[in-house]
Amino acid sequence: MSVELTGKHLIAGEWVTGESTFASEPAHGASHDFAMGTPAHVDTAAKAAEEAFWSFGYSSRAERAALLNRIADEIDARGDAITKIGTEETGLPEGRLVGERGRTTGQLRLFASHIEKGDYLDRRHDEALPDRQPLPRPDIKLVQRPIGPVAVFGASNFPLAFSTAGGDTAAALAAGCPVVVKGHSAHPGTGEIVAQAIDAAIKALGFHPGVFSLIQGGTRAVGTALVQHPLIKAVGFTGSLGGGRALFDLCAQRPEPIPFFGELGSVNPMFLLPAAVSARGEEIAKGWAGSLTMGAGQFCTNPGISVIVDGPEADAFAAAATAGLEAVGAQVMLTDGIAKAYRDGRDRVAGASGVQTLLTTTCDLRNATPYLYSTTGEAWLANEELGEEVFGPLGLIVRVKDTAEMVAVAKSLQGQLTCTLHMDAGDTADAQALMPVLERKAGRILANGFPTGVEVSEAMVHGGPYPASTNFGATSVGTMSIRRFLRPVSYQNIPNDVLPADLA
Ligand code: NAP
């Protein structure tokens, strides 16, 4: 299929420009001009989304499932164009973009089958007890209803799966909520072609055009106006702690505060228990080097910290990790800004007291090479800054005196997306001591693996206590993520023919 980049916003079915433009900054290939978003664009899109809600919010689950499946098909039809511009804009390799597209369309199709099953509606019924003493009980039914227009901010590091038609958009559309996406300035062309696919699906199936809009950024005023717009009822965000916190605060300060579902940063610590280290410490180190450098370390689930009991086996682990990381060359990062933030993070870790450098190299501005540092449990516990995320392939080994100090390190952690245990049968008692701490800290705890792959499935939680996310009851990956865009309503003594179709 031939695909043409227009550089325009998609607002309620119309492709529109504005007074000014901004130029994309691709890792390679030609730069393109894109219309700059304004608060006026946000207003038009939000009003159209609200208007669309009166039909879309009451559409059948089968109709919305058809829309999700059609969007997936339209994305696949534009697959080559998406891969081409995606690799240019982000510097991510072609294989990664192809794989991520499969994840994105798979996610859309998974939501289609999920809503058709209907379990997510959590329907409940308290039957009337007219003869109950001292008072009769009314008939009460409960069902989950869509909340209204949702704003979505995609992430730079997943230009497809966490962006324009990513998990937040799929979950919101599945729930029956129209979506206004604020395009990420790191991949505006990728965002536009995906928006073309969504537009084609909406038009083919005859939905209200306000069901979906994409407003390109270019200025922070778009995001600010979007989260403050009175018709927006919730925000899905994947990005940095600083950006997420600023937008979260704006949501809380509105006359009508709204939920802000931000998936932010995490250092994803790994706890290496003694029997596992004795049996296969070097193998774990090699695996860590691979996980830490995958995609230039630009994963929110990147395992930045390894906690290990000090001694000769920790020396061998550090040597194997250094060798594994040394072998990895420079990789291009998503943006100049992310590469600069990576170097700033390196300087912060390298300059902290009690930190020893194991591996450091230099490279060009937009490239990243791995860095490895080591510290003691005592220095970690004295220096909160070491627990802050460095987005990129940077590792820190924390050498603790014993497993009791390992538990103290675990207790000192901020909220995490993941915590990992490397354990053998002989480590069960230590794992049992850590588990109550880890489950208070993280959304996902895993054993004998690496956290960088996040399965899109029924039982997945991609979230966690702040700052991993701004809403610890939610996940942004997997079918449970639909709950963020639903609200329970009770219907008391309402006749069947007046109830929502999902209850009647
Ligand atoms: P980002 O810089 O926070 O940008 C995310 C989006 O928010 C962009 O559209 C950005 O606009 C907008 N934005 C940021 N600050 C804003 C502000 N003050 N006002 C209005 N809009 C604002 O994050 P990123 O570069 O996309 O992603 C990198 C970070 O995301 C890393 O820290 C990583 O750990 C985290 N991340 C987390 C997850 C997760 O699931 N938890 C997944 C991936 C990434 P512009 O386009 O104008 O910059």
Image (spheres, helix red, strand yellow):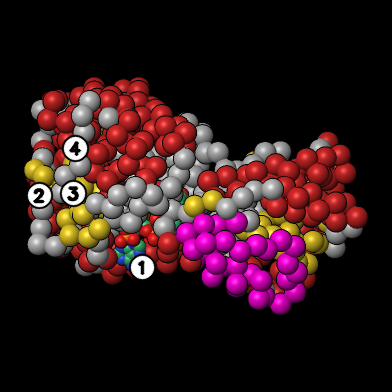
The residue positioned 22% from the left and 25% from the top of the image is 1
Disc with the residue nearer the chain's start (3 vs 1): 3
Q: Which residue is mark 3?
A: 7
Question: Disc 3 on helix, strand or loop?
Answer: loop
Question: Disc 1 on helix, strand or loop?
Answer: helix
Q: Using the image as rendered, state which of residue 385 and residue 482 is in the foreground.
A: 385
462 lies above or below 414: above
Marks 1 and 4, how far apart in space? Answer: 35 Å
Is the distance from the Cβ of mark 1 to the nearest ligand 1 atom less than 8 Å? yes
Q: Is residue 347 magenta?
A: yes
Estimate how packed mark 2 is, as few (under 14), some (14 to 19) or many (20 or more) residues with alpha carbons within 10 Å. some
Estimate how packed mark 4 is, as few (under 14), some (14 to 19) or many (20 or more) residues with alpha carbons within 10 Å. few
Question: Disc 2 on helix, strand or loop?
Answer: strand
399 lies above or below 10: below
**Residue 4 has which mark?**
4
225 lies above or below 134: below
Three-letter code, disc 2 = Val
Q: Where does the magenta region start and end?
A: 341-369
Q: Which residue is mark 2?
A: 16
Marks 4 and 3, how far apart in space? Answer: 9 Å
How many callouts does the rendering have?
Answer: 4
Q: Is residue 253 magenta?
A: no
The residue positioned 34% from the left and 37% from the top of the image is 84
Marks 2 and 3, how far apart in space? Answer: 9 Å
**Quadrant location, ligand no. 1:** bottom left
Three-letter code, disc 4 = Glu
Three-letter code, disc 1 = Ala
Three-letter code, disc 3 = Gly
Disc with the residue nearer the chain's start (2 vs 3): 3
Quadrant location, the C terminus: top left
Q: Which residue is mark 1?
A: 246
